[in-house]
Image (cartoon, rainbow, N blue to C red):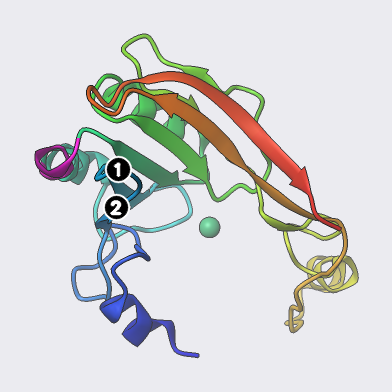
Amino acid sequence: MEIGPYLESSERVVRPANASALSPGRGMTVVPVENGTRLAVINVLGSLFLHPASSMFEMIDELVETALRETPLVVVDVHAEATSEKVALARWLDGKATAVFGTHTHVQTSDARVLPLGTAFITDAGMSGPHDSVIGVEVELAIRRMRTGLPVRFETARGDVRIEGALVDCDAETGRATAIEPVRVLIS
Ligand SMILES: [Fe+2]
C-alpha cells in the first residue's frame, strides 16, 4: 500500500518534522490519552546518514513550543543513527519535553534515565519485531546482500518476536518525568 495518502489522512501517524515540507503527512500530532489528558508526539530525523531536509536543531524549539501550547505532555521521537545526536537533542530539550526516545538503531540501550531537569530519555528504545534477524530482515538474505554487494530482495523475519520500548512515569500537570524503565516483552 502507498503510505503517502495514509500519512496525509492519519491524525495518529507522524513522519519526520524535518522531512521535506513537500512530503505528505505531519511531524507532530496531539492525541487524547485518558481523563481528558492529551499527549503531543513529535518525530525528528538526525543528520548522520539520513539526509533530512533541514537540521532537527533548527526547528525543534518551534515544534516543542507549539506542542506546549496544547499540552504539557510532549514526547519527542528522535530517529537518528548517531547516539551523540540523540543525547545532544535530549539534553537540549531537558526540562521542556516529557520524554525523548531515540529510535532507528534497533538495539535497546541500557541508559534509560531522567535528565537533571525532568526529561526522561533513552538513546534507543529498541526494536519491536523479529529479533531472530538482522534488524528485522531474514538473516540469510541480509548476509547475502552484504557479502556479495548484489541487490537481494529483503523479506521480514519471523522468529523471536519482541516488543521493546520504555515506560515513563510523569506528572500530567507539569509534564515532567519522574521515572523511566526500559520494556522488553517476549511474544514468540
Ligand atoms: Fe530508521
Task: Provide residue 10's location: percent of width, then percent of height.
Answer: 32, 74
Query: Which amino acid, mark 1?
Result: Asn
Q: Secondary structure at mark 1?
A: loop
On residue 32, the disc is 2
Mark 1 neighbour density, 10 Å: few (under 14) some (14–19) many (20 or more) = few
> Is there a contact, CB below 8 Å, between mark 2 and mark 1?
no
Relative to 158, 25 lies left or right? left
Q: Main secondary structure of the magenta part?
A: helix
Query: Which amino acid, mark 2?
Result: Pro
Toward the viewer: 102 or 175? 175
Task: Provide residue 57's location: percent of width, then percent of height.
Answer: 24, 39
What separation in Å lies between label 2 and label 1 (alpha carbons)?
9 Å
Relative to 59, 167 lies left or right? right
**Residue displayed at 39% across by 46% down:** 46
Task: Provide residue 54's location: percent of width, then percent of height.
Answer: 24, 54
Up/down of 62 relative to 174, above or below: below
Please identify the quarter of the rendering in which residue 58 is found: top left
Q: Secondary structure at mark 2?
A: strand
Up/down of 49 relative to 5, above or below: above
Relative to 148, 66 lies left or right? left
Question: What residue does disc 1 label?
Answer: 35
Q: What span is in magenta?
A: 66-71
Mark 2 neighbour density, 10 Å: few (under 14) some (14–19) many (20 or more) = few
